[in-house]
Image (cartoon, rainbow, N blue to C red):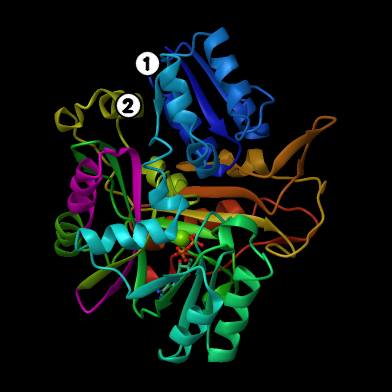
Amino acid sequence: MKILVIGSGGREHALIWKIRQSSKVTELYCAPGNVGIADLATCVPINPDNVQELLKFAADNQIDLTVVGPEAPLALGIVDAFKREGLRAFGPTKEAAALESSKSFAKDFCNRYKIPAARSQTFTDIVSAKAYIKGHPLPIVVKADGLAAGKGVIICDSHDKAEKIAEEMLLEGSFGDSGRCVVVEEFLEGEEASFIAICDGNHVLPMVGSQDHKPAYDEDKGPNTGGMGAISPARVLTEEIADKVMNEIMLPAARGMVTEGMPFVGVLYAGLMIKDGEVKVLEFNVRFGDPETQALLARLKMDIVDVFEAAISGTLNTVSMSWDPRPAVCVVMASGGYPGSYEKGKVISGIADANALDDVVVFHAGTKDDSGNVVTNGGRVLGVTALGDDMRSAIAKAYEATEKISWDGVHYRKDIGKKAL
Ligand SMILES: Nc1ncnc2c1ncn2[C@@H]1O[C@H](COP(=O)(O)OP(=O)(O)O)[C@@H](O)[C@H]1O
Ligand SMILES: [Mg+2]
């Protein structure tokens, strides 16, 4: 089979690494990929949101299966466009991708199908938004409706701040079209976890649990990022809670999407808040998480291509997933300053030494080749991923590997997985 993966981050490197292990693969491409991916696949310089060029590439090269990493091309309808040309792409249609690309759609959907979520209301009009904000307790959460690269959610500790954020989104266009509608939501306390499942429209095949680490600094301080590290499993996702998530969230969501006339095929990712044995959905994503995927795929012990093919053909009920019982930890190494401004082009050393350790794999994200040197080229640069006999040794292994890698200005959290001990 000829397979194309779309994207260029650590998530896509992990997908390529896993797909490469499949005996079914004859040729593997990634658009646009990165330096690490280039060792395993042919990188094609087409951006993920250039659906027309990707389609042309896939048709010209008779790609048998396309796996879409990021949300943007899904929201642009890449799966629909491929389908129209008779090409197989793994992911939801544009319509179904609204579960992620419109938070107001997702909230209404949860209400319609009684999926537990934070109480909220959606506004396009600032006067009603302000009135609602004033009448609700603090903290209060203001969310831009559309895609905002993880920056569109503001937790406000005063009514003034919430009103100001709503004004910026609705009146000043601070998030462009994504903020033309806002969701104002009750603040939920508890512990977050990621529940990621593969869906074929009718069946839901859950992966093991995982947890992201969003804030930039240790002890969950500092601004939110795309994710500074991940672990799998997540201690909060006990078997009992996982059953609850399936019965109260994932299965109702899959059935709901069928009822809506848009069966969900692809990755359904529920961002959860868990407290005292109760679970609520913070949001749905319609693609693999980054960096959760790096930790998850390090544990997956089967051919992932079988899963994608079964999802597309509606036969996921015939597949079961097999997992390494050992925990995995992914430590994200970032450019100093991220998620604010940072410098690029710093020469990275030590990647090969880290990769040489047993049960360690270094996934590339923002890297590029500069005359034979691997240099930094983004905020999140590497995802150092390790397995260990228990969580403590997985953490120790991941940091042993991380410490072999350096560049001028590198930053990483020192406490990934600590909460799980
Ligand atoms: N209702 C809420 N209560 C508490 N924290 C929230 C709430 N909604 C979002 N958050 C926090 O903000 C983060 C980002 O929100 P999320 O809805 O996942 O949006 P996105 O990932 O699109 O930025 C969450 O991971 C969580 O930490
Ligand atoms: Mg999120």
On screen, residue 303 versus residue 122, left or right, reads left
Task: Tell me the SS state at disc 1.
Answer: loop
Asked whether mark 1 lies closer than 8 Å to ligand 2, one says: no
- Mark 2 is on which residue type? Asp
* Residue bearing the label numbered 2: 303
Check if residue 254 falls in the magenta segment: yes
Residue 344 placed where, x, y %?
Answer: 81, 50
* Circle 1 crowding by C-alpha within 10 Å: few under 14, some 14–19, many from 20: few
* Residue bearing the label numbered 1: 23
Residue beneath the point at 19% across and 30% down: 319
Query: Which portion, as a residue range, is magenta?
Result: 249-277
Q: Is 311 situated above or below 28?
A: below
Q: Is 269 situated above or below 279?
A: above
Residue beneath the point at 78% across and 62% down: 341
Q: Are discs 2 and 1 less than 8 Å apart at CB?
A: yes
Check if residue 85 falls in the magenta segment: no
* Mark 2 or 1, nearer chain start: 1
Q: Is 421 situated above or below 256?
A: below
Task: Tell me the SS state at disc 2.
Answer: loop
Residue beneath the point at 18% across and 37% down: 202
On screen, residue 421 versus residue 385, left or right, reads left
Q: Is 271 situated above or below 273?
A: above
Q: Is residue 421 visible?
A: no
Residue 338 placed where, x, y %?
Answer: 70, 62
Residue 307 placed where, x, y %?
Answer: 29, 29
Residue 35, picture quadrant: top right
Q: Residue furthest right?
A: 371
Viewer-closest of 303 and 354: 303
Q: Is residue 329 visible?
A: yes
* Circle 2 crowding by C-alpha within 10 Å: few under 14, some 14–19, many from 20: some
